[in-house]
Image: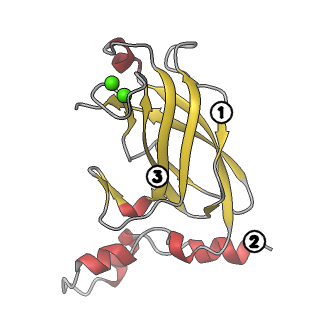
Amino acid sequence: MFLPLLLACLEPSPDDNLLDDTGVDTATADDTATTTPVACADATATGTLSVSFSMETDYIASMDEPPVGTFYGAFYSASDVTNTGPVAGAEPWAQLIVPGVDLTDPVGGPTAALATTDPIPACEVVLLGFLDSDDNDIDAGDPVTFPIAPNTATVLAETSTPFTAFFGLTNPG
Ligand SMILES: [Ca+2]
Ligand SMILES: [Ca+2]
């Protein structure tokens, strides 16, 4: 019964538009926002993510404290986040706060599944967040999730999908 919903999510990717390219460049900022692979705002079904954590071991070696603490983050529409963070006005679909994240055994993880998100639209999302390894909110040296793969996930309707957040670097400051 979910097939129509899934099909509804399979909107053309930006690359598909090449087939329709008339050679006239009419792209605008608004066009960019409406040619995302999956439009979360249009999704009519929801699913959840079962979240584990992992981290680049080279960055663990550079930290002043063990990579242990509370994770603070949120899932956004993948199309709402750039390398510098959420675009203006972007609202997260689900907050994620997970105490007790411990990436020391095994070093770098992955951990077991430590949390399940609230229901999220069945679409492509990205996780933006940090591990507060020194218990003082976000600051220099805290592990962070860069908002690109593998911190992207496709939420499937009525399904809890495994997802491993990846701290690929530490906050430069
Ligand atoms: Ca901190
Ligand atoms: Ca820190």
4 with respect to 171 (left or right)? right
Quarter of image, res 43: bottom right
The label nearer to you, 1 versus 3, is 1
Q: Nearer the viewer, residue 64 or 23?
A: 64
* Mark 3 neighbour density, 10 Å: few (under 14) some (14–19) many (20 or more): many
Q: Which mark is residue 2?
A: 2
Identify which amino acid the numbered label 2 is placed on: Phe
Q: Which mark is residue 25?
A: none
Q: Give how far across and how far down residue 15 sits, in percent.
A: 36, 69
Quarter of image, res 116: top right
Q: Earlier in the sequence, mark 3 or mark 2?
A: 2
* Mark 1 neighbour density, 10 Å: few (under 14) some (14–19) many (20 or more): few
Residue at horizontal 35 percent and vertical 35 percent from the top: 138
Q: Determine which residue is flagged by label 1.
A: 114
Quarter occupied by the C terminus: top left
- What is the CA distance from the residue labelled 1 to the residue labelled 2? 28 Å
